[in-house]
Image: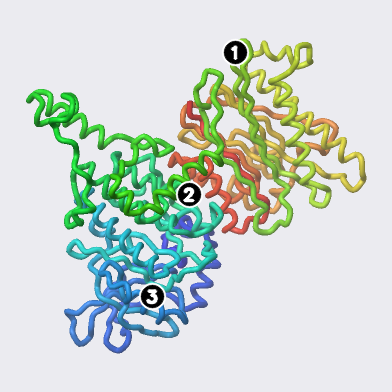
Amino acid sequence: MKCPDCGYDNPEGAVFCDDCGVSLSEAVAADSESGRGALELGQILSEHWKIAQVVHYDSRCGLYEAEDTQDPERRALVAEGHALSEALNDWIASLHKIELPIVWCPEELAVLDDRLFVVGPWPGEPVSRILDGLEPKAAVSIVRQVLLGIEALRDNGAKQCVISPEHVWCSDGQVTLLQTEPISASDDASSDCAVVIEGFSSPEMFGLMGGKISEASDVFGAGALLYYLLNKGELNIKRLGAGCFGFPNPLVGPGGPLMAVAAKALVREPLERFATVREMRLYLEEALGELEQPIGGAPADEQPAAKESADEKPDDEKPAAEKSDEEAPAEEAAESEAEADAPLSEENKTQPLPKLTAEKLAEAPAAAASRVATEELSKKTEPQEAPRASGKALPYKVGRLSNVGAVRTVNQDAFVELQVMACERDVPVSVHFLAVIDGMGGEAEGDKAASIAARSASREVLHSFLNLPGEDCEAEKDLPLAERQAAILQRAMKQANADIYAYACEAPERRGMGCTMSAALISDGILTVGHVGDTRGYHYDGELHQITRDHSVVGQLVELGALTKEEARHSPKRSLIYRALGTGADVEVETYQRIMNRGDYLFMSSDGIWEYYSDEELSGFFAAGGEPQAICDQLVATCLRRGADDNTTAIVFRYLP
């Protein structure tokens, strides 16, 4: 089934689009009511333009090749935006003011059945069709021209520039940037009015990272295009199931200074990208200069500064041509192989950005100053990983997110992340405690139950690892680590149960309050999970494994073979829980053990998230090796687009020793 909203071909019977996450039934109904659909070949517009080819079509934009009925050799590009706009004439006039061939300028309007089309010169073909044999020099030339076009559009009042392989066209080396509908400047530009394209739109354009669109959003789009071209049309991500935003993953792909520029542009946090598109352009030109492939036709004052002469270099830094015949070929081959294979680290620091000359920095003083300010701000605001007792960085990354959902008014979910580090007599202690808690009871203070569980269990975990001599749990120090972690989780969750139950017994109106909880302790690669209810824990080691089992009616039916997992996800009885914290004086806590290896993920969530995904979809989110926080953001955002009738909470932990 083709999604009318994004154009993706979904399997027959799909409920949600595997690309954009929208409800297919609602999108099809809306598309039917609007009467939209791609124009048929042979359709006549404005009496003399005949549609000859559908170049690209989705609900956001339609692009067509048209022939002049009077002169079949004359071609034009016909573009359809969202709807009629009162600002259209002003927008077209502003494009003509730019006077740059890089920016496509419509020349006439056409209306067909209340649908608006703009017609302009034929710009060649989309870059997606010229990827075969595209060399890095040519890719950089394309992106450089796009950046110049974005600069001109922003100088002319554009709030956002739409960038994708369908919006960038080439003809004999000339690049044309299509902007097919008015996007005017606004002081409060937000994701509500953004044109979003999977894989080429920044996180803030999906409403993440504050949802504030800025020039850094255009930097992200240009970085995605550069990455796409350098990788011959691949973003090196797997389709992560429904609602995948498709953010490019800079961990994979060719190394070198060009990819370092792309990685800097693709940083998730807007403040950490290039401050302006001009700044990105300058770094891109310098990176190409480092590869000794200057851009043809670039002004002399924009060429990289001359390198120091060979006579001034030490022997080990002289060009290969001046070294012995035996040394040069071997070193050239080694350098070429290293340049091609060098991966970028998760912090995008393995390949450093090129150094700009003083002359180039002077071209964009505002950008340079902004970058310095951003770096200082990042140092102050970003959480720093604490060192081990040995002085090494902690071997993990964590993402976490909780959202009230699209229907509820109170968030009864909670999560905990507690890092315990200590060193006594040169013996280091390093453990991570994570928990996802889902309150239940509605008016009976389910949110209070979740809060009590979070505080009570955290206090017990901290006490267990930092206990005083003579205390009851001191004997656990002699247990093997896995047994000790299991004993601590058992005690922590039972104490949480007792505290909730005692609080509920204080007043009749609190009867029925409680919560479900999945908690984990991780130390030295040993993962222990404690569990009560239908929150879940998963381990991803190349395959997705559900660690916990649901203490619910449908969970039992699945174990007995009476229901499939898919049927259980949609069962009206899926919220019936037979075991929870706080509903009785005592509770049985189940514990599980796993070994985590480098790169493995631990994923824990409330039922408000996992109910919206099949195991195959969930597995896709981790298969690409993405950042834990980005995965959390994508999971929650997709749930919100799918309705999110419950609170949504997720924790993603990645083990990186």
The answer to whether any part of residue 306 appears in the image is yes
**Residue sitting at 30 percent across and 80 percent down?**
107
Which numbered disc, 3 or 2, marks the residue closer to the eye? 2
Q: Earlier in the sequence, mark 1 or mark 3?
A: 3
Nearer mark to the viewer, of 1 and 3: 1
Say which residue label 1 marks: 427
Residue under circle 2? Answer: 271
Q: To which residue does mark 3 refer?
A: 80
Establish if 433 lies above or below 63: above
Q: Which of marks 2 and 1 is in front?
A: 2
What whole-number distance in Å separates the C-alpha atoms at marks 3 and 2?
34 Å
Q: What element carries label 2?
A: helix
Q: Quadrant of residue 429?
A: top right
Q: Label 2 amino acid?
A: Leu
Q: Which of 76 and 179 is in front in this view?
A: 179
Secondary structure, mark 1, is strand
Amino acid, disc 3: Glu
For the N terminus, the image quarter is bottom left
Instruction: Tell whether 132 sits left or right of 366.
Output: left
Query: Contact (CB < 8 A) between labels 3 and 2?
Result: no
> Pointer 1: residues within 10 angstroms few (<14), some, or many (20+)?
few
Q: Can see residue 556?
A: no
Residue placed most toward the observer, 367 or 410:
367
State the residue in front, 517 or 32.
Answer: 517
Q: Position of residue 259 (x, y in %)?
A: 32, 44
Please give left or right for residue 452 compared with residue 70 in the image. Answer: right
